[in-house]
Image (tube, grey):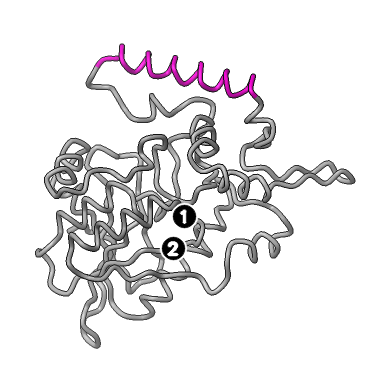
Amino acid sequence: MTDEQPTPDMSDKPVRHILAISGGKDSSALAVYMRGKVENMEYVFCDTGEELEETYEYISKLQDYLCTEITTLKSERDFRYYVDLYNGVLPDARTRWCTRMLKLKPYENYIGDDPVISYVGIRADEPHRTGYISTKPNIKAVFPFVEDNIRYDDVMRMLKDAGLGLPRYYDWRSRSGCYFCFYQQKIEWVGLKENHPYLFKKARAFEKFDPETGDRYTWNQGESLDELVKPERVARIREEYEKRKLREANAFKGNQKLKDVWGGDDDEELSCNICHL
């Protein structure tokens, strides 16, 4: 395993092996890959309470495949509580308080002071990602896909062979995580409105404008969801998306990345460390 972190102290307590599942393809494939390789592996799902129904559906499907329980971890407080606590300021790429309070805190509370090896689903072809690495000395992160040179095609083959396939949200979305994730591309917001209009309405209700100060609290910098779904704006988003797909289709195959399709004027290479594994 990697030498970047110290191995948890095994002198007092037995080492726990934990694999956190997001409901996305990579962490799910890692669960498939590690099945039967580690005795007493614990599987956990950090539920923010703001997930897509397709995510819960896929977690249930994966649990049936593993023939073992996937423990659901939840914060004692919900997302609305933290929005109010932060005076209406929504999480963004700089603060990411949603990840910290709704995922990392419940996960580390679940671990406590026990020595833990945490299995992370970063692939060998993702050098720009680091994944969840705790500052707690009792947690050691390991990366089996990196160590065993497991790449995107391998992950897709594992899920297919296991009979799991991909979560249904991949039909219109490129990532796991909350339905209002601020890392979503504009075309994905359009997809949310079309596939889950009620959830789009909920996400829009979190946005605020203070006429006295001029402060705008929106999921996308410089653009509210009301503005984003105007017919002329949606048409432009679709046009830009189709152009990106065409560029991807004509690109040199060795350089193709999912971000070329889903990218654009957003920062598509960033993601929350535990949300999108």
Residue topped by disc 1: 51
Q: Is residue 201 left or right of residue 52?
A: right
- At a point 42% along the width and 29% down the height, the residue shown is 262
Q: Is residue 33 left or right of residue 23?
A: left
Magenta range is 231-252
Marker count (numbered): 2
Q: Nearer the viewer, residue 66 or 195?
A: 195
C-alpha span from label 1 to label 2:
7 Å
The vertical placement of 37 against 89, above or below, is below
Q: Nearer the viewer, residue 95 or 49?
A: 49
Instruction: Identify the image quadrant of residue 63.
Output: bottom left
Question: Residue 147's x, y, as percent?
Answer: 16, 49
Q: Nearer the viewer, residue 56 or 85?
A: 56
What's under tag 1, amino acid-wise?
Glu
Image quadrant holding the N terminus, namely bottom left
Query: Please, what secondary structure does the residue beneath circle 1 have?
Result: loop
Q: Main secondary structure of the magenta part?
A: helix
Query: Please, what secondary structure does the residue beneath circle 2 have?
Result: loop
Outermost bottom residue: 12
Dots 1, 2 in contact, CB < 8 A: yes
Give neighbour class at mark 1: few <14, some 14-19, many 20+ (Cα, 10 Å).
Answer: some
Residue topped by disc 2: 47
Q: Which mark is residue 122?
A: none
Give neighbour class at mark 2: few <14, some 14-19, many 20+ (Cα, 10 Å).
Answer: many
- At a point 17% along the width and 67% down the height, the residue shown is 67
Question: Residue 29's x, y, as percent?
Answer: 21, 50
Question: Residue 274's x, y, as percent?
Answer: 39, 56
Q: State yes or no: residue 241 in magenta.
A: yes
- At a point 25% along the width and 53% down the height, the residue shown is 28
The vertical placement of 251 against 22, above or below, is above
- At a point 64% along the width and 19% down the height, the residue shown is 232
